[in-house]
Image (tube, rainbow, N blue to C red):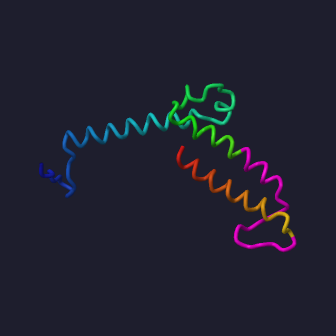
Amino acid sequence: APKLPTMNGNYQLTNVEAQRVMAVLDELATDLRLAFSLTPQTLSTTQDISSLVGQENERFFVMQEELERQFMVLASQLEGPVSEFVADAEHENQDSVVHDFFDVARRLRKNTREI
């Protein structure tokens, strides 16, 4: 169906298009309510995470907790500011910690985006 022009030169949505937009907005509102209800305190005190997020999403949240734990452990082992791209001859023993730290940081960012 051709778009119907309005007085300002834009077009009006058809009834079907408007219903599709509303369905997407309803789903977004539901997802946002869930996201804002999942605080670290809620997740840490819930025995069955799948009851909150569903079984298909549970693995992402379990992985998130594990990656956050690894990140904190590795961060505490760093001896100061580090760069992923610049080797520091004075701190050769830190090389594996630095490598692991940035690896976990990348995995943590990726998992966070997937959640």
Q: In terms of image quadrants, where is residue 18?
A: top left
**Which residue does the image show at 37% across and 39% down from the upper left?**
25
Residue 52 counted in the magenta span = no
Front in this rendered view, residue 67 or 10 = 67
Instruction: Say left or right for 33 vs 97.
Output: left
Instruction: Say left or right for 80 vs 33.
Output: right
**Which residue does the image show at 43% across and 36% down from the upper left?**
29
Front in this rendered view, residue 11 or 30 = 30
Where residue 59 sits: x, y (%)? 58, 38
In the rendered view of the protein, which quadrant contains the C terminus? top right
Residue 82 counted in the magenta span = yes
**Which residue does the image show at 28% across and 40% down from the upper left?**
20
Q: Residue furthest left?
A: 1
Where residue 21 sits: x, y (%)? 30, 42
Where residue 37 sits: x, y (%)? 57, 32
Which residues make up the magenta segment?
69-90
Q: Residue furthest right?
A: 90
Q: Is residue 97 above or below residue 83?
A: above
**Which residue does the image show at 76% across and 62% down from the upper left?**
98
Q: In terms of image quadrants, where is residue 91?
A: bottom right
